Amino acid sequence: STSAFAVAPTALCSTSAIVASTLCPTSISTSAFAAAAAEKLKALKQEEESARRAATQLSQQRDKLTEKRKSLWRDEQKETEKLHAAQDDLGKAQRTLQHSMSRSQWEAVQAVKRIAREKGIRGVEGMLIELFEVDDKFFTAVEVAASNQLFQVVVDTDETAAVLLRELQRANAGRVTFMPLNRLRPGPDPAYPQSDDVIPIISRLKFAEHLRPAFVQVFRKSLVVRNLEVGSRFSKSHDLDCITLEGDQVNRKGALSGGYVDLRRSRLRAQTEIAKLGEMCVAAEASIAKLRREIEQVDDEVTRVMGELKKQEAA
């Protein structure tokens, strides 16, 4: 009876093999699925973290660009205010200079500049007063020495002057005295006195060398002197016009002139302000244009960043 119920070892082994072969595939499949799910979850978390970091970076970039744009707007506002202030002061200086001339003279000179600009006439240097610099302590003496010659228009040749004269006549735009550089023959400098009490005015003027004939023509016979006594002596001995820093004059013919001078109405002071303020306006306009280009670039960059940020948020 024992042999009837005995199971052969080979049969047991075979049965175990069958059970193992039946159960192992399911166990392996479940484990692989879990591992794949965990890997996918990890990848999703990484993508989410990467997207969050990208969104944070974009937000920070947007904030920086926005602050930069605000700063540029403030700078533009400051430059605009500076430009408007300079333009206002420039207008005042131009009116001061204008009021030191007759209305017809001012209008004629402005007509010359307009005609030269519109018709492309080259060789117009400008009014004499626009073409030199001098220390402000000499302003009054220089103005007395040159008088209305300061408003004569310097041109390169008599041909240029002739063209402009015809245009002025055609436009009925007034009269102007031209100084054609090719026709000026001022002659040699006089023998100036060797004295610490006098200064040849022309030695204190700063101008382009090619304009020298015009300045020699106007100033070669003028001296700045310490006082009228010194002026009286040298005007006779050297045949020169002698002028004090205050504007009192002894001319070479012996006549004396002088009196109160209102420095606030100085032609040279007004012209100096016009030149300085004109440069300030040009610089401010260039700065504003540059700032506006930068603002436009930042605007484009903000738009780009905002677009990318919206894509990140929608993803």
Image: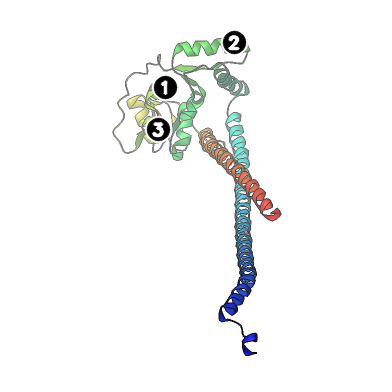
Q: Which mark is residue 65?
A: none
As rendered, which of 237 and 212 lies closer to the eye?
212
Q: Which mark is residue 206?
A: 3
As rendered, which of 23 and 147 lies closer to the eye?
23
Q: Gap in Å between the C-alphas at discs 2 and 3? A: 34 Å
Q: Gap in Å between the C-alphas at discs 3 and 1? A: 13 Å
Residue 173: quadrant of the picture: top right
Residue 219: quadrant of the picture: top left
Q: Residue furthest right?
A: 314
Q: Which residue is mark 2?
A: 169
Which amino acid type is marked by label 2?
Gln
Which amino acid type is marked by label 3?
Lys
As rendered, which of 310 and 81 lies closer to the eye?
310
| Mark 3 or 1, nearer chain start | 3
In the image, residue 2 above or below residue 265 = below
User: Can you give x and y, in whole percent of width and height, for residue 236 in the image?
Assistant: 35, 26
User: Can you give x and y, in whole percent of width and height, for residue 258 in the image?
Assistant: 50, 33
| Mark 2 or 3, nearer chain start | 2
Q: Residues within 10 Å of mark 3 (few under 14, many from 20)?
A: some
As rendered, which of 54 and 157 lies closer to the eye?
54
For image coordinates 38% across by 21% down, the residue present is: 213
Badge 3 marks a residue whose secondary structure is strand
Badge 1 marks a residue whose secondary structure is helix
Which amino acid type is marked by label 1?
Ala
User: Can you give x and y, in whole percent of width and height, for residue 287 in the image?
Assistant: 55, 41
For image coordinates 45% across by 34% down, the residue present is: 141
On the picture, is 228 further left or further right than 262? left
Badge 2 marks a residue whose secondary structure is helix
For image coordinates 45% across by 40% down, the residue present is: 137
Q: Which residue is mark 1?
A: 214
